Image (cartoon, coloured by chain):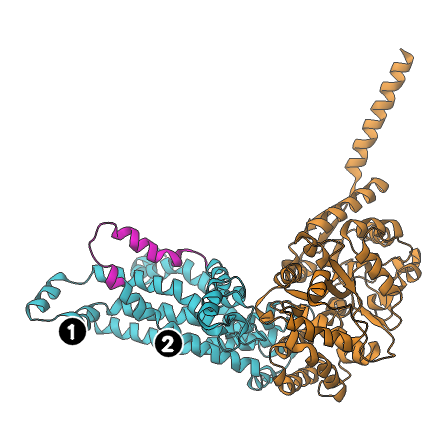
Chain colours: A orange, B cyan
Amino acid sequence: MVRFAKGTTALMVALLLSTAANAQQRVVKYNADYDPIPLAAMEALIADFEAANPDIDVQLNNFDHEGYKTAIRNFLTADAPDLANWYAGNRMAPFVAAGQFMDVSDVWEANGLGDSLASAKASMTIDGKQWGVPYTYYQWGIYFNRDAYKAAGVEEPKNWDEFVSNCEKFSAAGIDCLTTGTKALWPGAGIFDYMSLRTNGYEWHMDLTAGKIAWTDQKVKDVFAQWARIQPYITKNHAAIDWQDAAALLVQGKAANYVMGNFAVGTFKEGGMTNDTLGFMVFPEITPGLARAEEAPTDTIHIPAGAKNVEDAKKFLAFVASADAQTKWNNAQGQLPVNKNSTVNSEDPYLVAGFEMLSTATGGIAQFFDRDAPAEMAKAGMEGFQEFMVKPENLDAILERLEKARQRIYK
Amino acid sequence: MSANWKANQRRLAPWLFLAPGLIMFLIYVIIPIFQSMWLSFYDWDGLGAKTWLGLENYRELVDDDAFYTSLKNNVIWLLLYMISVPAGLLIAIFLNQTIGGMRLYKSLFFFPFVISQVVVGLMFSWFYAPNFGLFYNLIEWATGTGIAILAEDKYVTYGIIAAGLWPQIAYVMILYLTGLNNVAPDQVEAARLDGARGWKMLWYVILPQLRPATFIAVVVTVIGALRSFDLVSIMTDGGPYGSSRVLSFYMYEQALSEYGYRMGYGAAIAVVLFAIMMVFISGFIWKMWRDETER
């Protein structure tokens, strides 16, 4: 009887405590732009965080991915959440310059992130301060269809010349050597970035996107001269199709290679490709001896300047930056953790290859053309790349137009 | 007060009734027009501080190839969109018969106007799509090589206009159908007694009576052509490399799209578009004014 009474009291106390906790929960509002798979991963992460911090309630408010890019400008000024997704590099510069993101250098300092997130520190730093926390990135490279390689009787290329001569053989076999879908423009920029990184190296590419190099420079023309060698073998009509349509061409074996980000693996596999038919390779070397640089756009979380619950938001940032959280999220999503103490899912050959490729990239890691260059320049550039891939004969006019844009944009 | 009200009631009442509409019009149309004009003298990214540029945005516009592409496309839109007026008339006359089931045919012809422009754009982009599109395959079957209309800078604008004409013709048709209902049968009969048939009947008897309908048809077609935004946005996003842009799309792109946020420059384009529209609008208003005062 006594025992029973003790039990009920304990139960009562527990109940009281839990309701009290509920009543005192502090809310952290988090605006994000996840597709279904990463959304589930983030919800799992939030559940872990809330389990560790029962007094905090993270309310995830998910937006449509494309719509988010417009919405963020409104909600940052009108109704700021406590956390918001965005991107590293130049893409966050306008918000930092306008004072819309909060300096979170103290989170970096307190959690030793300068060490564990070292690879992304430069792209998170503006004016010597850090403005957010990176939690994932993904490599770009060439995804290829092994069956198409077999059908054309072609080996994996070891360098650029072999890649180009392969293209001739693919063409003879009626297969597009390289496919892309530039209706939304950005896939073409992936090809440009690699042409540029491989022809002139990382430092030069960064100078170009920072507006320090004229687009009419001979070295820019060198990049396009290399690009022109494969231009005839790129899928015709790429300007009318989306990247998913081009992915279908690769899946069907109508195209052999695709310069893409690792997020496309899911689409390839939905189309029926397996680890046996879908290959991944590092973009081949063009100028011999250049330190190899790679492309790996980083996704980040920031605290808006108008956040109401800064303290708990910072707790969440520290949690997302931790090795365990990044391991968990990235394994669920099939991307790479930024934290160097995280582990990569060893069952996924593309992740393993990507991790290996990025950790040995001595040249540097670029974000992506539309994150390294300011928005206006990115738009003008990507249109130019698309036009070049359709009408290479317009190159001089394109470069002059880009140079004009550069002189206006980087004043 | 009440004496004052009684004296001026007849003069004040119309304004009171108009007031709600006028206030809305002022807040949502007139004031924004002047705000846009004001904004077009600034450089502003929508977040930070505005910087006064004076006429710099317009100077840049004069030197902007993309602006001229958009302007040219707008002209093409205006000219080709006019096809919908005779085409709509033709279908209206064809459908203006008393046969069983005519209502069904009429609704079928009117159908494209009922569906959303976004849906029209999607349907046509599939129609033109390389590899699986019906149009693409037809061309491939006829000539041996398919043409992806939406990837060719030469054809893309025409491809989009064709998509726009489909609902627009239906719209014009319905305007003419109602107009044809009001054609005086006695005049037609008298003309027939005088031996008018076919084209002569159409030109001298029917068309003059359809003048109000024609006027409205031209007005909605001009407006439709100038504000052609949704189809461009859905079908090509202005591409390939910006060759299918029109002014309204270019304005949106510069001011509000992912890589834009040049509010001032977008506003400058809006002002130019407004000036072009103003030419037509004042023409229409002048004509309406003249018609009413003549009566």
Point out residue A73 in the picture as x, y percentages from the top left corner: 67, 62
x, y percentage for residue B144?
49, 72
Is B256 placed above or below A29 here? below
Name the residue at 42% across, 58% down: B20
Q: Chain of mark 2?
A: B
Q: Quadrant of residue B180?
A: bottom left
- Whether residue A248 sits left or right of residue A259 in the image: it is left
Q: Which residues are magenta?
A: B92-116
The answer to whether residue B94 is magenta is yes
- The residue beneath circle 1 is B200
* Tag shown at residue B282: 2
Badge 1 crowding class, 10 Å Cα cut-off, few under 14, some 14 to 19, many 20 or more, is: few
Residue lying furthest top: A1
- Residue B85: horizontal and vertical position, in percent? 32, 70
Residue A158 magenta-highlighted:
no
Instruction: Judge by depth and name the residue closer to the eye, B263 or B113.
Output: B113
In the image, taking residue B164 as reference, residue A241 lies left or right, namely: right
Q: Main secondary structure of the magenta part?
A: helix
Mark 2 and mark 1 lie on one chain; the one further toward the N terminus is 1
Q: Quadrant of the N terminus of chain A?
A: top right
Look at label 1 and name its amino acid.
Lys
Mark 2 or 1, closer to the camera: 1
Q: Quadrant of residue A142?
A: bottom right
The quarter holding residue B291 reads bottom left
Residues B218 and B29: in front is B218
Asked if badge 2 and badge 1 are on a common chain, one would say yes
Give A47 or A347, whichever is nearer the viewer: A347
Residue B223 image label: none
Disc 2 to disc 1, C-alpha distance: 33 Å
Residue type at tag 2: Ser
